[in-house]
Image (cartoon, rainbow, N blue to C red):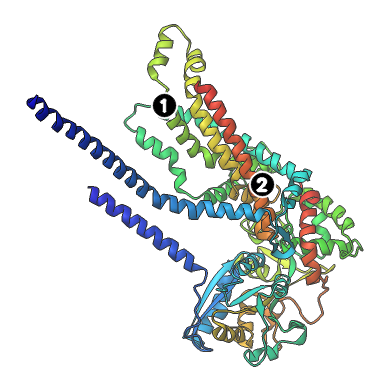
Amino acid sequence: MTLLQNKIPPATHRGIEEGVLERAAGKRNRRTYLALLIPGLLGLLVSFVFPLAYMIRMSFNKGAPDGVIIETFTLETYIQPLTDPYYWRVTLDTFQMGVTVGVLCVLVSYPVALFLARSTSKYRGLLIAVAIAPLLTSAVVRTYGWMVILGTNGLVNSSLEGMGLITEPLKLTNNMTGVTIGLVEIFMPYAILAMISGFGRLNRQLEEAAGSLGASKFKVFTRVTLPLSLPGLLTAFLLVFVLAISTFITPRLLGGGSVQVLATEIYDQTTGLLNWPFAAALSVILLVLFGVIIAVYQRLTKKIGG
Amino acid sequence: MRATIKGKIAAVAASTVAILTLSACGGGSGSSAGDSPTSGEVNLIAYSGVWQDQYTAAVIEPFKAKYPNIKINYASKRSSAEMLSALQGQKNNPATDVAIMDNSVSTTGNNQGLFEKIDTTSVPNLANVPEKFRDKDGYGPVAMLDAVGLLYDTATFPKAPESWKVLWDPAYAGKINVNAPPSLLGLSLTAITSKMEGEDYTKGIDKAVARLKEMAPGVQTFAPNPDEYQNVITGQTVLGLGQNARGQFYSDQSNKKMGVTFPKEGTVYQINTINLVKDAPHSAAAKTFVDYALSAEAQTAFAKALFYAPSVSNAELPADVKNRVVPTDGSLNIVPLDVEFLSSARDKWTDTWKRQIITK
């Protein structure tokens, strides 16, 4: 008994002590995590939450000519674009541009990404670096590059004319064609990166197993490779779509004023007509559009994943 | 290791706080301490690009040589609307002292109480600005004048086109650049077309819109990039709307590959005023700068550099420059685009262009 009494309490003490220590360590850890989060959260608060709240508040004000902002609480800035066919068309064009650029970008990036993901070459790292290297150059510079290539006297038109295929230069800039070409190329590195990271479930052995069971190369691709790479494809499409509908520089520079999308409209309202409340309302509409798309995407990925 | 990470986090946190503090202070960098007519600094807001380069070389550098104790901080903006927007944002805590901007926009600024009145006691050179170039209420006077011109490719047009109607000529379809409103160039073309159609554009622009719609399919770009001048110089287009001053400058730069002319049906003035910001942080030094900007010396130098017509009566221009700046003696056919009217028409006309004129 004495022995027991002597033996048990220290163990219990140890147990209590350990528990206390663990809890204390847990608290300390939690505090460290929170402390670690503070700079980021502070940055987010100042650079994202406040401006967003300010923008949403601004969208309920009223804009008068010459940049005068009437502080009020009205839905006029929302009613106007939502009841005006012109803004419906602009929104639809924005959406269409996003889908077209997203689909084309995924189509041209898929083979590259697939090759990079499956490559066992010792140069794989270098090849990936080369594929995403365009990100090192500003989108403005690359857009100007496309203006030179696609212009009336540009590389494409002069080559086609030189080969005698056309007599009049093709109109490849200052319209949606130019914007689409430019955006697809500009967003390719993003799509490639998103796909490579989304190809997690892609396994060469599964393809080999399908092959050894008699599936043709085409069947292996359609039944094994493609379904397994679908999450990556969807992520890439969503990323490019979101980037495309919010992009301003390329539609502005390559669109020549004829491509009117939400981003260019917001720019015009902000810097040209100084109607900040209206520009803010359009921005909120664009944000809602983002939200809807992301919700649809999550549903889709769940379906595919499940 | 732990200490290093902690140290790093502390450093990041410290720098975040420092950046936030700095950015919070950024809005009101001005201080009136040490500001006098001959010392201190002047925060100037004006146009960017070639305008900034030439104004710096022709006016700001000589000013700095004359007043070595006054520092000029040049904040450049692409358009007067952007300048107005910046000034509106600083209204309660002005950081800018002087603004050089389009008079249609500066009038808005005057009405919104953004600017201060200027008189000859602090700005003696104002006495040399003729009455017609002064503001009737005493706000910032005209600093320089220009007008909308027709840009043309000299290889296609050995002789300058005489009429704006060339923009409708099917021979040049697809080779035209027109800056759509809210650009002043597009607003001016709307008024000019309206006048050509015998319409009073202050009442309505239906006829002008119908006519501009006929032109639109032949327009290659409604927002030329990098700008309206380079588009003609590089052969992307052969005709375009542009400003005479920059047009003359780029004509020289391109070895006369591009020319600029005032067609017979008339044109619209583009007038820049120089304005003193209300409650400017460096008011005394700012007035010295405004006075210098209105001196014959500065006005002549800028006319020689970028072909803007001077607004002071005592500026003497050499004949080869005088022939190339916009005439201000009444010899040019001017389509009047009233500032107050423009303020009400800008939104409407921009909307009309977007919905009815600009083609996809």
The residue most toward the top is A214
The label number, if any, that marks residue B252 in the structure image: none
Q: Are marks 1 and 2 in contact (CB under 8 Å)?
A: no
Label 2 element class: helix
Residue A236 at x, y percent in the picture: 51, 33
Percent position of residue A95, x then y: 66, 38
Q: Amino acid at mark 2?
A: Leu
Closer to the camera, B233 or B344? B344
- Residue at the image position 50 percent from the left and 13 percent from the top: A219
The vertical placement of B290 against B339, above or below, is below
For disc 1, the marked residue is: A200
Chain bearing mark 1: A
Q: Is residue A169 visible?
A: yes
Residue bearing the label numbered 2: A262
- Count how many numbered circles sit on residues in the image: 2
Query: Tag 1's secondary structure?
Result: loop
Instruction: Please rate how many residues cluster around mark 2, counting C-alpha atoms within 10 Å: few if below 14, some from 14 to 19, many from 20.
Output: many
Point out residue A99 in the picture as x, y percentages from the top left corner.
62, 34
In front: A205, or B24? B24
Q: Residue at x 47, y 34 (%)?
A: A194
Q: Is residue A158 something that shows in the picture?
A: no
Q: Chain of mark 2?
A: A
Q: CA distance from mark 1 to mark 2?
A: 35 Å
Quarter residue B7 falls in: bottom left
